[in-house]
Image: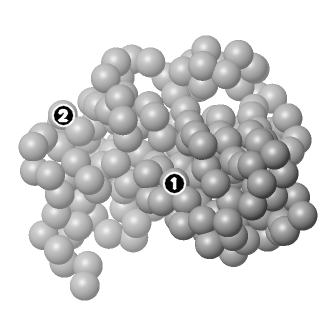
Amino acid sequence: MNFKELIQKEIFIKNMLCRCCERIVREDLLKMNVQITKILSPFVEILYNPYTINLQQIDAILQQSGMGIIISREQRLVEQAKQAVIELIHHLNNMDSMVRKSDYLVEKLGVNYQHLSKLFSKYEDSTLEKFIIQNKIMRIKELIVSDEYSLSEIAYMMDYSSVQYLSNQFKKETGMTVSEFKNGDFF
């Protein structure tokens, strides 16, 4: 293959939210002879031969893994919101629990929260608030399993006003109590 025939393109990939997703994207694109020169999730810089494959085919393969190429500015903003939520909840552990999720998103993305919330609902199967809650519950499960923090500390870290509020939301979202989860009584 002649290097001059290759096209370099930066694409924005939907639902590429973790390292596992990056691995899947790498594997899927490699199977199609698409080279990745850089990944800064959700951005991926690729090199491909337009005579053997096109962006629609790349998108179709990515969609099989629950991802896909995003073109519209609105959809990119939604993906950036998802990335910011994951960053705050999973990676920063909401270190400053006084920072409200909505304030963090507004500051990080530079858009009005109501506008962002409407866009999220337009392009996703849930609301932004539901996405935040689901990620908080996932992180709470990780923290419970790690057994490093008390439930009071976890409630504070995840921005709950009380252990009771955390417990109620946990039960509502998972169908089990925190104790049942902690004891493995859900199998």
Residue identified by numbered label 2: 153
Query: What kind of residue is marked 1?
Result: Glu
Instruction: Give the mark nearer the N terminus: 2 vs 1.
Output: 1
Residue 120 position within the rendered picture, expressed as x and y whole percent measured from the top left = 75, 44
Residue identified by numbered label 1: 22
Return the residue nearer the eye: 40 or 176: 40
Secondary structure of the residue carrying tag 2 is helix
In this view, 142 is above or below 129: below
Return the residue nearer the eye: 154 or 78: 78
Decide if residue 144 is on the left or right side of residue 31.
Answer: left
Q: Residue at x 27, y 30 (%)?
A: 156
Q: Are marks 2 and 1 in contact (CB under 8 Å)?
A: no
Task: Determine which quarter of the picture holds residue 171.
Answer: bottom left
Regarding residue 48, the answer to whether it shows in the image is yes
The quadrant of the picture occupied by the C terminus is: bottom left
Task: Determine which quarter of the picture holds residue 141.
Answer: bottom left
Return the residue nearer the eye: 82 or 3: 3
